[in-house]
Amino acid sequence: MRTEGDTWDINTSVGSTAVFVAAARALAGRRPEPLAVDPYAEVFVRAAGPEWADLLDGKVTEHSLLDPGFGASFQTFQEARTRYFDDYFAAVMAAGVRQIVILAAGLDARAYRLPWPDGTIVYELDLPPVLEFKRQALAANGDKPRADRREVPVDLREDWPKALREHGFDPAAPTAWLVEGLLPYLPADATDQLFDNIERTSAPGSRVAIEELGKQPEPAGTEVEQPESVVAARSDWESLVYNEQRPDAVRWFTARGWHAEGISLPDYLESLGRKTAVASDSVQLMPSLIGLTTAVRPAS
Ligand SMILES: C[S@@+](CC[C@H](N)C(=O)[O-])C[C@H]1O[C@@H](n2cnc3c(N)ncnc32)[C@H](O)[C@@H]1O
């Protein structure tokens, strides 16, 4: 269960979800014709502990990420969202935006992976132990960022715009924000506050990309029985999220004069020619409740 002001490191509570999604990215990148490849995901997963390395090395057979229903769909979900947000950043670079803020960066390696133009600054916000694990794992692997990467160790339930400014953030420059894999871990009112902070800290010409997750319905009792590993993973995850109705990002930003567009995960996959790549909601993934949104604040 979550509590106010709770904290974690990379292997506990919400921190461990960063490893879980990195493992899904690493596994998805090995499949034929992946939608996105993140070579750093494997570096992080191996550094997270031997049980994670065993998963990548095929020494584990019972794991929710290997399940042909849930696991395959979850891998597709992760590679799809990686692709969507990588494309978002390609548009950001083309638009000349050079100030990037990744909220709840976790094990996002875009500062190392994407071809940032000279002068780009990438701010990464997360709890201190998560950022520390990330820095150590990549340094041990000899990796260097491709932008001016700045860590901002902060709890996103606190005054993070202040922390961002203290690390050099320029509120007068257009910013590209990323909110990926974060909202379910914040209470609904904190989501509203987060959007508000982004809006108030965004100069004209700023952009934001957001992954949304709708409120999950209560189990109907008619669900197809799942393997133990999937049931356990689901129950662990449920104990970490706030299953609440959140503001709709397209509506929220449109109401404030931004140009916003959203697409559901199934529709996005269909647009990529992968219509049947995620299994139906009965495998407890709820793809229809996952949305990908981009909004642009007009330059003038
Ligand atoms: C599922 S991971 C996603 C990480 C990354 N964005 C990605 O997509 O790979 C969730 C991340 O949110 C971070 N997080 C959640 N709540 C947070 C909070 N209140 N303050 C700072 N970080 C938070 C966790 O530490 C973790 O790194």
Image (cartoon, helix red, strand yellow):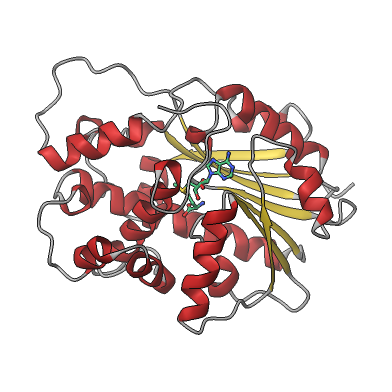
- Counting from the top left corner in percent of width and height, residue 25 is at 35, 61
Residue 256, above or below 86: above
Can residue 109 be seen here? The reply is no
Residue 215, above or below 37: above
- Counting from the top left corner in percent of width and height, residue 86 is at 53, 62
Q: How many marks?
A: 0
Residue located 34% across and 52% down the image: 20
Q: Quadrant of residue 42?
A: bottom left
Residue located 12% across and 34% down the image: 226
Residue located 33% across and 65% down the image: 26
Toward the viewer: 63 or 74?
63
Q: Quadrant of residue 254?
A: top right
Residue located 16% across and 15% down the image: 221
Q: Quadrant of the N terminus?
A: top left
Q: Is residue 162 left or right of residue 283?
A: right
Can residue 88 be seen here? The reply is yes
- Counting from the top left corner in percent of width and height, residue 22 is at 38, 59
Residue furthest out toward the bottom: 142
- Counting from the top left corner in percent of width and height, residue 45 is at 35, 65
Toward the viewer: 167 or 80?
167
Toward the viewer: 249 or 218?
218
Residue 158, above or below 223: below
